Image: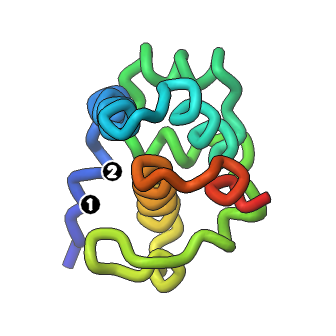
C-alpha cells in the first residue's frame, strides 16, 4: 500500500512563509527575526532563502535541499499540533515542525538567544 505524502510536503514554502511573518509581526516581532530563525535552522542564507521562495519550492524539497540542518535543532523540544517534536520519526516532518515550533516561540516573546538554542 502506498502511503500518500502529507499535504504539507507538497505545499510551496512560499505559500506558508507570509503566515510565519504575519504571526511574528502580530506579536511585535519582525520579518528579520523570522528570516534569522529559518536561516539558523536550515543553513540557507538570505539570498538562497529568497531563491527557494521565488522558485515556489515545496516544503519537502525546501528541507531536502537545506544546506545544513542546524546540529542544535535536536534541542528543540515541546508540543506542536499535539505532537512532541522530539518524537516525530519522519525527519522531513520533524524539520517542518521544528520550524513551526521556533516561529511559535518567537510569537510568544521568547528571546532570540533562547529560540536559537545558544
Quadrant where the C terminus is found in the figure: bottom right
Disc 1 target residue: 5
Locate residue 72, reporting x and y percent: 75, 64
Image point (49%, 28%), residue name: 30
| Mark closer to the observer (2, 1) | 2
Instruction: Reply above or below: 59 against 18.
Output: below
Q: Is residue 65 left or right of residue 6?
A: right
**In the rendered view of the protein, which quadrant contains the N terminus?**
bottom left
| Residue in front for this viewpoint, 100 or 32 | 32
How far apart in space, not on screen, are marks 2 and 1 (Cα)? 7 Å
- Residue marked by disc 2: 9
Circles 2, 1 touching at the beta carbon (< 8 Å): yes
- Residue at position x 73%, y 47% in the image: 68
Q: Residue at x 57, y 40 (%)?
A: 38
Identify which residue, 65 or 69, lies in the foreground: 69
Where 34 falls versus 48 (above or below)?
Answer: below
Front-most of residues 23 and 14:
23
Q: Give the x, y percent position of residue 88.
A: 45, 79
Q: Identify the residue at horizontal 41%, vertical 30% (top origin).
A: 57
Please tell me which residue lies in front, 14 or 84: 84
Q: Which mark is residue 49?
A: none
Vertical arrangement, residue 39 with respect to residue 95, above or below: above
Residue 18 drawn at (x, y percent): 32, 27
Disc 1 secondary structure class: loop
Q: Residues within 10 Å of mark 1 (few under 14, many from 20)?
A: few
Q: Is residue 64 left or right of residue 7?
A: right
Does any portion of residue 65 appear in the rendered image? Answer: no
Amino acid at each position: 500500500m502506498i502511503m500518500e505524502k502529507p499535504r504539507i510536503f507538497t505545499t510551496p514554502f512560499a505559500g506558508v512563509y507570509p503566515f510565519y511573518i504575519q504571526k511574528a509581526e502580530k506579536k511585535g516581532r519582525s520579518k528579520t527575526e523570522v528570516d534569522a530563525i529559518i536561516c539558523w535552522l536550515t543553513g540557507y542564507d538570505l539570498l538562497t532563502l529568497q531563491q527557494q521562495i521565488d522558485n515556489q519550492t515545496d516544503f519537502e524539497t525546501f528541507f531536502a535541499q537545506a544546506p545544513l540542518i542546524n546540529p542544535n535543532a535536536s534541542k528543540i523540544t515541546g508540543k506542536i499540533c499535539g505532537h512532541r517534536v522530539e518524537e516525530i520519526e519522519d525527519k522531513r516532518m520533524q524539520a517542518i515542525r521544528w520550524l513551526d515550533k521556533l516561529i511559535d516561540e518567537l510569537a510568544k516573546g521568547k528571546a532570540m538567544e533562547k529560540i536559537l538554542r545558544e
